[in-house]
Amino acid sequence: MHRLRTCAARLRPLTASQTVQSASQTRPAAAGAPRTFQHIRCYTAPVAAEPFLNGTSSNYVEEMYFAWLENPKSVHKSWNIFFRNANAGAPPGTAYQSPPPLGASLSGLSQAQALMGAQPNVEKLVEDHLAVQSLIRAYQVRGHSIAKLDPLGISCVNFDDAAVTLGLKDVDLALFNNRLIELTTGGFYGLDESDLDKVFRLPTTTFIGGSESALPLREIIRRLEMAYCQHIGVEFMFINDLDQCQWIRQKFEKPGVMQFSLEEKRTLLARMVRSTRFEEFLQRKWSSEKRFGLEGSESLIPAMKTIIDKSSEAGVESVIMGMPHRGRLNVLANVIRKELEQIFCQFDSKLEAADEGSGDVKYHLGMYHRRINRVTERDITLSLMANPSHLEAVDPVVQGKTKAEQFYCGDTEGNRVMSLLLHGDAAFAGQGIVYETFHLSDLPSYTTHGTIHVVVNNQIGFTTDPRMARSSPYPTDVARVVNAPIFHVNADDPEAVMYVCNVAAEWRATFHKDVVVDLVSYRRNGHNEMDEPMFTQPLMYKQIKKQKPVLQKYAEKLIAEGVVTRQEYEEEIAKYDKICEEAHARSKDEKILHIKHWLDSPWPGFFTLDGQPKSMSCPSTGLTEEELSHIGKVASSVPVEDFTIHGGLTRVLKGRATMVQNRTVDWALGEYMAFGSLLKEGIHVRLSGQDVERGTFSHRHHVLHDQHVDKKICIPMNHVAPNQAPYTVCNSSLSEYGVLGFELGFAMASPNALILWEAQFGDFNNTAQCIIDQFISPGQAKWVRQNGIVLLLPHGMEGMGPEHSSARPERFLQMCNDDPDVFPTIPEDFAVHQLYDANWIVVNCSTPANFFHVLRRQILLPFRKPLIVFTPKSLLRLPEARSSFDDMISGTHFQRIILDQGPVSQNPSGVKRVVFCTGKVYYELVRERKNRGMEDSVAIIRIEQLSPFPFDLVKAETDKYAQADLVWCQEEHKNQGYYDYVKPRIRTTIARSRPVWYAGRGPAAAPATGNKKAHLLELERFLDTAFTLDAFDGHS
């Protein structure tokens, strides 16, 4: 019966006065302590009041009670009435009602029923508790939508005209009912004003009670308002992990969580002073210069520093950051601590450019700095990646570099290296690369174990209102797809910002998952300092002009609290102003702008101290016969016991073994030789892209799958040598932009790794065009940053239609920086010097041996350049497209052009025509020449390295065949492919003494026909043109 009484008491709501009275009888109240409510068990029906409850019957009654709980109809009516009355709080002695006698009138029965109805209804009791739980959940789910997040007070997430009201501190029922309509669709869940002082037990899904397990409804509402409807809005209830939801609830609901020490508040004020006064200094000195200042969002600086401090405390040693242009100079100055004079001299229009590259504007530059974190007294490395104006393009690059640094230092959990990404509100919602990057966040070969995203939400995108810029309520809604919690915070409340950033850093350290901080702020100026925002947002900017700066607000708050005096505040301002003035004076001594001072990814020990290559030569890229045989055996075996491979793969491996015995390699085996040898030499190799493990064309098979055991795999490449470097081969998500950006970032971290991205088909590279155009092609010129990434782009006209035919070589060649009209001087090691001066290398190999050499050359060169390889499709299995070990042994090199070693080389004067070509079309030309019996009169020369153009070797060949016609033959259409790149360079080589004729498909809008017959007809026509010696008679 004790359990019965306890259960009834736990469900029954008490009035606040009863609770306080009971509590005061059990413990003395501390002087000045806040009023709290503690649940006190109150048994309203003493055992003595019910004479039938004694020691011998209590067990029987308890069994009856449990039976009644399961099914009220399973016990006699009298017991049903007793238990219901006892649970509903019947006064002592009245819970038991004897059943009416058999002959009793109906009026007696109705009186018993009336007595039951007069007591509190247990259903109402349960409904009220459920209502309170629903109310708590409503705040947790939707409280953020009515929080006071906008510093300007002019907008809300629904984009209507109603201003958002501050959360209710003193609960007024009328206002509360209106609030509940916004929070829920069901109003006040049946609770009314009379319930406000009732005490309800709190569910386990809330922490608002702190140490108390029950609170009056009025206090429940007040605490929920304080937790969810003030300057912080928390979105987390969509997360499908209960522990994570509970963790967040505890961080925001527990009473008194946002308490800061005096020292923390002073530090926060000092950071706000630096953030604000830096922008004001720039405005005073260079009022007409673009700088994309942080005015209106100055809380970003203490936000970032808080994240870094907390992460350093958790053991993070390196933070890699990416951000847009707004606030970049402030971040460089006050977060990374770039020397102020180096920033200020960027504004000097008379500053001479160094000869290190073409450079970039100051608000795109990056930085790398290792320093002591003053809060934790630990070393920390901060790296801000350089980036273009293409917003969010840097996101995957940052993630790739972070992954690489984690990989090289053995940080498998992300405890030592982390990424921090800053975003603008319009770009975060509008740019698809954000979504692509989020989807890499939990993939095994791409995860960085949690990124902290900070959205500087100034509620406008250039001139576009949010209602025109996105369809979602918040700019951050894209983060929901990966269950990342989103913390919205009013940027005009620096303490709220600081708290949220602490929680974000703790979340990342605890769960190693992404988290988003939405810093809701405003932009005091236009898009840049020269822009007039009143043209398009007049009302918003009228409000902004009235807005008191956040530093002033916070300083006044702390002065009022007695944390600092006005004099101390003014001294802090004067101190930083003096630092800026002194740095400005020093900046005038700078005469030359050195871009290398802004390098974001240094490679210690790879270059000389002044950043130059240690040599300008490249050793042989060949291997010993023994090494080739050994790697070939690994490639044709399964180095794991009890592993069952597919029957088709057994034939593939046997075929490889036969080739190794015959000292030959096909394309897949040539690639295997290159990778395996580099791994053996301690060079990490990472191959990434769609379906790369098997290969789009089922030729690679670098990951073997057991046919009987799920997820049991074998990667033979990781069994080449005992102390080899690891080989990473990973199928990527179906993304090009994000994944290529990721691999580019990975390649930035170290020069001693071969990082390759393979497109499923070459034409898919155009989905990643931004990374190619803005980072890979001009990266070194803009940011003095070398990169050795390799792009493998399957290319070739195979009659498969306009898609999947062309990798668009014309686009890559158009971006090459060599001059078509100048024949270069030819020094010793000309080939290496030419590579060093190039912005990237473009090749189309026609043999596996040359592909093998060009991959090894990427690592053996004393510098790094991006390599673009147009890889074949039909050549993968073409018997003629195999190479001998003789072309790959020690002493051999990559061949920039491959000469015709046939009969024509014995009698050059008898050659009527020289056909230059590249790639797969060579084999079709050779076949056609043989069919026509023209081996003595037509020479076919393959240009394997298109850029930088092999002027020296082409000149030797044109001089050799001085009397022959010169023809460029390609399978691509005339306005595509290589013709427009090659023709002027050959003409320069021969001093324009002869024309360079064209044999190939005519101009077209599409890369290829979709009709197989038309494809073959086009091939027949241009081969006929190539071998008809009078085809160009009469042409000029």
Image: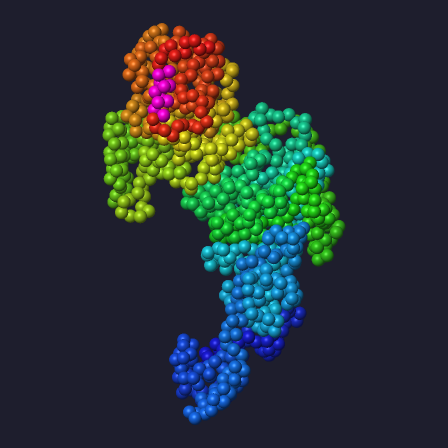
Q: Residue 1018: within the magenta?
A: yes
Which residue reaches farthest right?
Answer: 567
Residue at screen point 51% across, 34% down: 770
Foreground of the two, 738 or 848: 738
Measured along the vertical axis of the image, is residue 351 above or below residue 182? above
Count the labels in the image. 0
Q: In the image, residue 678 lies at what x, y percent?
A: 38, 31
Identify the image quadrant of the N terminus: bottom left
Residue at screen point 51% across, 27% down: 608
Structure colour scheme: rainbow
Measured along the vertical axis of the image, is residue 879 above or below residue 756? above
Q: In the image, residue 218 lies at what x, y percent?
A: 61, 69
Residue 344 visible in the shown view:
yes
Foreground of the two, 890 or 541: 541
User: Range of the magenta residues?
Assistant: 1014-1025
Q: In the image, residue 196 lies at what x, y percent?
A: 61, 71
Foreground of the two, 887 or 160: 160
Residue at screen point 57% across, 67% down: 188
Measured along the vertical axis of the image, is residue 677 above or below residue 94? above
Residue 59 visible in the shown view:
no
Q: In the image, residue 743 lies at what x, y percent?
A: 45, 37
- In-image side of 936 versus 989 (left or right): left
Q: Residue 184: within the magenta?
A: no
Measured along the vertical axis of the image, is residue 101 above or below residue 702? below
Which residue reaches farthest bottom?
Answer: 103
Prevailing secondary structure class for the magenta stretch in the rendered image: helix
Residue at screen point 71% across, 34% down: 288
